[in-house]
Amino acid sequence: MQNKWEAIRGSVGFYVTLAVCLLVAGISGYFLLVERKEPAAKAEAPVIDTATAAPAPVIEVAEEPEVIEVISPAPKVKEITSMPEVPVDDTPVTAEAPRIIVSPLKGEVLTAFSVDQLVYDPTLEDWRIHDGLDISAEEGTSVLAASSGTVLSVHDDALMGTTVTLEHDGGYQTTYAGLQADPVVEIGDSVSAGQIIGAVGTAPAEAARGPHLHFSVEKDGDAVDPEQFLNT
């Protein structure tokens, strides 16, 4: 018996049969394993109950406000029916040369203009008003016309000595007193601003103040401050 088994094991058919058996066993085991895995793979996906599921949140989008353009009404223009009549002045205009005013004399002011307060006069030793400027200068110093005009008068005054008065436009008159005798102008002469009309002399009523020019100004017959006239 033993010799028969050994004879079969040593033949080729034995090994062929053994290989076939092993192949059949392997194939049977493969299909068995596949059948066990398929139920798990074919498991149905879970069903979601839409009736009980929480609804997704709704996001509200704010609407843009409507822009309303306000158009202002155009301003009403007042209709001009007629232009007012403006009277026309046809009077011819004459061009006038600018007034030139110069100082009649350069020097120290000894006595200022004062018609509101009395001023002491050392010569007459009394108090009186002073209607002009006393401008100090040496005897013989030239005296100039303060502005253009016409010689209104030339005379000798008992208190103020030789005196020349000029008439100017605008109602002004200028007076130069305390001059030396025989001034260089006569009544009716036309003079220009800065023209020499005489020379410094002596005013008897103001001799104590030394040689000087007494210069006064009137406007429409009223005495005005000569300094204001010179600075206009």
Image (tube, helix red, strand yellow):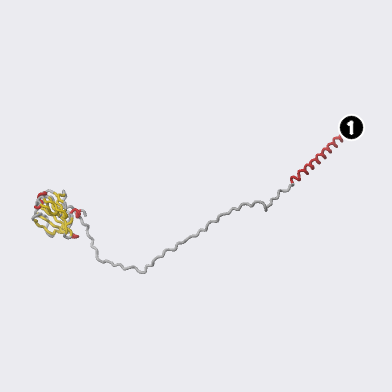
Compared with 98, 31 (above or below) is: above
Residue 47 in view (yes/no)? yes
Q: Secondary structure at mark 1?
A: helix
Q: Position of residue 128 (x, y in %)?
A: 12, 54
Where residue 89 appears, x then y in whole percent? 27, 66
Furthest residue to the bottom? 81
For badge 1, the amino acid type reads Trp
Q: How many C-alpha atoms fall within 10 Å of the one at disc 1: few (<14), some, or many (≥20)? A: few
Extreme residue in the left direction: 158
Above or below for 20 versus 47: above
**Extreme residue in the right direction:** 1
Q: Quadrant of residue 163?
A: bottom left
Closest to the observer: 132 or 142? 132
Question: Which quarter of the image is occupied by the C terminus?
Answer: bottom left
* Quadrant of the frame with the N terminus: top right
Report the number of discs.
1
Give residue 73's position: percent from left, percent from top: 44, 63
Residue highlighted by disc 1? 5
Residue 188: x %, y % from top left? 13, 60
Question: Taking 87 as reference, is 2 left or right?
Answer: right
On the picture, is 52 further left or further right than 119? right
218 with respect to 13 (left or right): left
Q: Is residue 9 above or below residue 35?
A: above
Look at the image and tell me whether residue 197 can be seen.
no
Residue furthest top in the image = 3
